Image (spheres, rainbow, N blue to C red):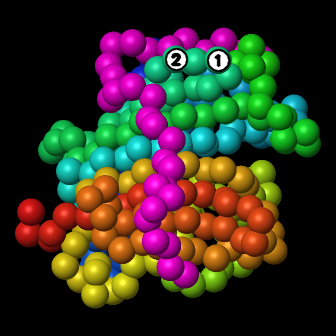
Amino acid sequence: MDNSSKLVWIEQFSVHTSDTDYRSKGKLSFILDIMQCAADFAVGNLGISIEEILNAGMGWMMITLDLELKRVPRPNDQLTVRTWSKGTKGALWQRDFRIFDEDDIEIATARSIWALVDIEKRKILRPSALPVQVKHYNGDSVGDMPVKVTIPSDIPMNEGYRYQVRYSGLDNNGHLNNARYGDLCCDALSLTEWDTAEIKRFRITYAQEAKLGDELTVLRSAVTDAGIYVRGQNSDTAFFEACIELRDNDK
């Protein structure tokens, strides 16, 4: 594992049983978590740690993610995550990911949009506010900036369940951790649906941070041509909109 250039950060992870579901397949939240960890390491090795960013009153906020899975991780897989900063557009940063198994076969790719924010003022900051220089990498590309997830107004959404943010879901910004939204979306599907399918693609746009005590109503659609839409909201706030595209287990 060579991170000497720092332009493409490489991090390795093992898949443990606690990272898998009742079918012994890697949970979506696990995949989101290892990408987040790799991104944290990449930024930390630019010369400013996540703790220093927090002490400066700043934090990273994911806006949109588009993840495509060629196969779902399995127990004992040895995974390698490669990630790089692709560039900025205005105040937004794009970060790409590729995930490989121990045979160097690519099993997943992802594109993400991030913003640097003033934690207290909840204001998006310009890239120049980061006190270190970030060199972008143009030697590879997963694709253009991902498109914001917007659930069509004519898609019926039905309540799946209700969720309250508690200690176990909080990150170091005091908000519901990005990876936990994967669990919220997956929990909207029934075991009957999971028995015969696995995730092919997951897209999510975070609209509002969920904090300790917030109560979310998680709604879902039926299966559409685009997949199953999921939204988390309360009476006056939409926290996220997402779409899960499934494929049959035998494909």
Q: Position of residue 83 (x, y in %)?
A: 43, 32
175 on left or right of 23: right
Give the residue displayed 21% in from the left and 41% down from the top: 106
Farthest-out residue, left: 250
Q: Which mark is residue 87?
A: 2
Identify whether 241 is placed above or below 149.
below
Q: Quadrant of residue 10?
A: top left
Give the residue displayed 77% in from the left and 51% down from the top: 173
Identify whether 6 is placed above or below 238.
above
Q: Residue 34, can we see it?
A: no
Q: Position of residue 154 (x, y in %)?
A: 45, 62
**How many residues crowd mark 1 within 10 Å: few (<14), some (14–19), many (20+)?**
few
Disc 2 to disc 1, how far (Cα)? Answer: 10 Å
Q: Quadrant of residue 130?
A: top right
Q: Which mark is residue 76?
A: none
Labels in figure, total = 2
170 on left or right of 244: right
Quarter holding the C terminus is bottom left
Query: Is residue 152 in the magenta section?
Result: yes
Give the residue displayed 66% in from the left and 67% down from the top: 233
Q: Which mark is residue 90?
A: 1
Q: Which residues are magenta?
A: 131-159
163 on left or right of 26: right
Kind of element beneath mark 2: strand
Q: Position of residue 73 (x, y in %)?
A: 27, 60
Q: Position of residue 192 (x, y in %)?
A: 28, 87
Tag 2: amino acid: Gly
Prevailing secondary structure class for the magenta stretch in the rendered image: loop
Q: Residue 209, can we see it?
A: yes
